[in-house]
Amino acid sequence: MNQGSTALSLKMIILSFKRKLAPTVTIAKLAVLHEYRSVLAQASFGRTDPVKWHRDWTTSYTKALAYRIIEVQDEIATIAFLQVIGTRMLPI
């Protein structure tokens, strides 16, 4: 076996592993959805820093938009956002 075919075989093996081990789009979408839902849930904790929370929410919302996740489409995201911050800002 010459060096050129060995390099080609090694490249084919690496590409095969990369395809098998790479996260699928579905797995990536689920991870982003989980992150988005987690950030929404964090707002209900008593000691959440509002500035940090908003930054985290913006980041997760932007990722979710990129993956076209239903929870951030149209009015659904607006309603969820307002519900979350509404519970935090209700007068005591």
Image (cartoon, rainbow, N blue to C red):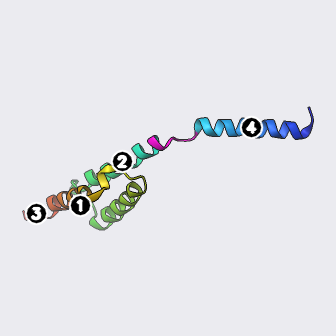
**Is there CB contact under 8 Å for labels 1 and 2?**
no
Quadrant of the rendered image containing residue 9: top right
Q: Earlier in the sequence, mark 1 or mark 2?
A: 2
Q: Magenta residues? A: 22-26
* Label 2 packing within 10 angstroms: few (<14), some (14-19), many (20+): many
Q: Is residue 24 above or below residue 82?
A: above
Q: Is residue 62 left or right of residue 71?
A: right
Q: Earlier in the sequence, mark 2 or mark 4?
A: 4
Task: Using the numbered discs, state the Cα–Cα distance from disc 2 to disc 4 in whole angstroms.
Answer: 33 Å
**Is there CB contact under 8 Å for labels 4 and 3?**
no
Q: Secondary structure at mark 4?
A: helix
Task: Using the numbered discs, state the Cα–Cα distance from disc 3 to disc 1 in whole angstroms.
Answer: 18 Å
What residue does disc 4 label?
A: 12
What residue does disc 2 label?
A: 33
Task: Identify residue type, mark 1.
Answer: Thr
What residue does disc 1 label?
A: 78
For marks 3 and 1, give the one nearer the viewer: 1
Q: Residue furthest bottom?
A: 51
Q: Is residue 49 left or right of residue 92?
A: right
Quarter that holds the C terminus: bottom left
For marks 2 and 3, give the one nearer the viewer: 2
